[in-house]
Image (cartoon, rainbow, N blue to C red):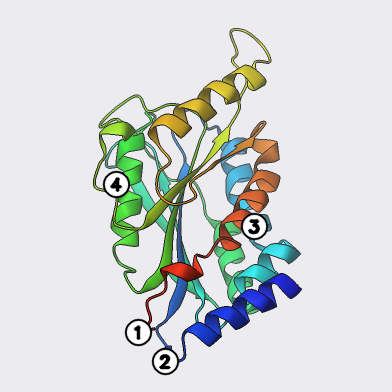
Amino acid sequence: MIRFLILAGLLTASTPALSQTSCRQALALGLDVSGSVDSQEYRLQLDGLALALGDPEVVEALVAQPSAPVVIAVYEWSAPGDERLVLDWRPIANLSDIREIQAILHTTQRANMGPSTGLGSALERGFALLEQRPECWTRTLDISGDGKGNTGRRPQDVSNTPNGVTVNGLVIGVDDDRTGNSRNLQIAELASYYTAYVIRGPNAFVETALGFEAYQDAMTRKLLRELQTIAIGQLSPSH
């Protein structure tokens, strides 16, 4: 807890003229709901995110500075043009805010969306969301997925990354029905693909989950890492 209090104090000291609309981090999360994700895996993903947000250390980081909160948005993606906003931008200033977000995630039901994997379009949708929050000191896009892009624009061809935005990845290893348990090989290949073509920006990284049942723990690790890397040096003196 001390490290978050110290960080909050440093941020407050360096930003004496904060307005009520200040935001220290915008976090957009894009969840893969393409055809490779079955109904059980879909539920593990949504519930895993909800439970990760409620992890005590994550809560501590999220509410460390209520005067300049983290804002969060969640969307689902599959085929190009098939993206659904699950949670529009929501500031997190206290535990009650987190509980409200968790309730939305736990009760969200799957929509009918295309089966293909449009990773390029998923990036573009996340960028469009983050462009709505230019006032935030840092802006982060999280892309979760269990496969490579196979339709629409390739992620490496999406070059309109907003200035200062970081894209992180959470890759999920799944078994191949044809070869049996191949999660370790698959996740290594997919992590390399995300590293080469998906993630970008300051301090970008890839987190891994060995199956959807490990998604909650992987998301918790990723959130903690992201929330602890707010770049104080990026704040302008006018703040």
Of badges 1 and 3, nearer the viewer stands: 1
Question: Is residue 88 visible in this depiction of the protein?
Answer: no
List the residue tagged with mark 3: 224
Secondary structure under tag 4 reads helix
Secondary structure under tag 1 reads loop
Q: Can you say whether 30 is above or below 210 in the image?
A: below
Q: Residue at x 43, y 41 (%)?
A: 199
Secondary structure under tag 3 reads helix
Instruction: Please report contact status of discs 1 and 3: CB closer than 8 Å, yes or no.
Output: no
List the residue tagged with mark 1: 238
Report the disc number at residue 147. Answer: none
Q: Residue at x 50, y 80 (%)?
A: 68
Say which quadrant the N terminus sits in.
bottom right
Q: CA distance from mark 1 to mark 4?
A: 30 Å
Q: Earlier in the sequence, mark 2 or mark 1?
A: 2
Q: Earlier in the sequence, mark 1 or mark 3?
A: 3
List the residue tagged with mark 4: 124
Q: CA distance from mark 2 to mark 1?
A: 8 Å
Q: Nearer the viewer, residue 95 or 100?
A: 95
Q: Can you say whether 140 is above or below 215 in the image?
A: below
Of badges 1 and 4, nearer the viewer stands: 1
Instruction: Please report contact status of discs 2 and 1: CB closer than 8 Å, yes or no.
Output: yes
Label 1 Cα crowd, 10 Å radius (few <14 / some 14-19 / many 20+): few
Give x and y (percent) for residue 47: 63, 51
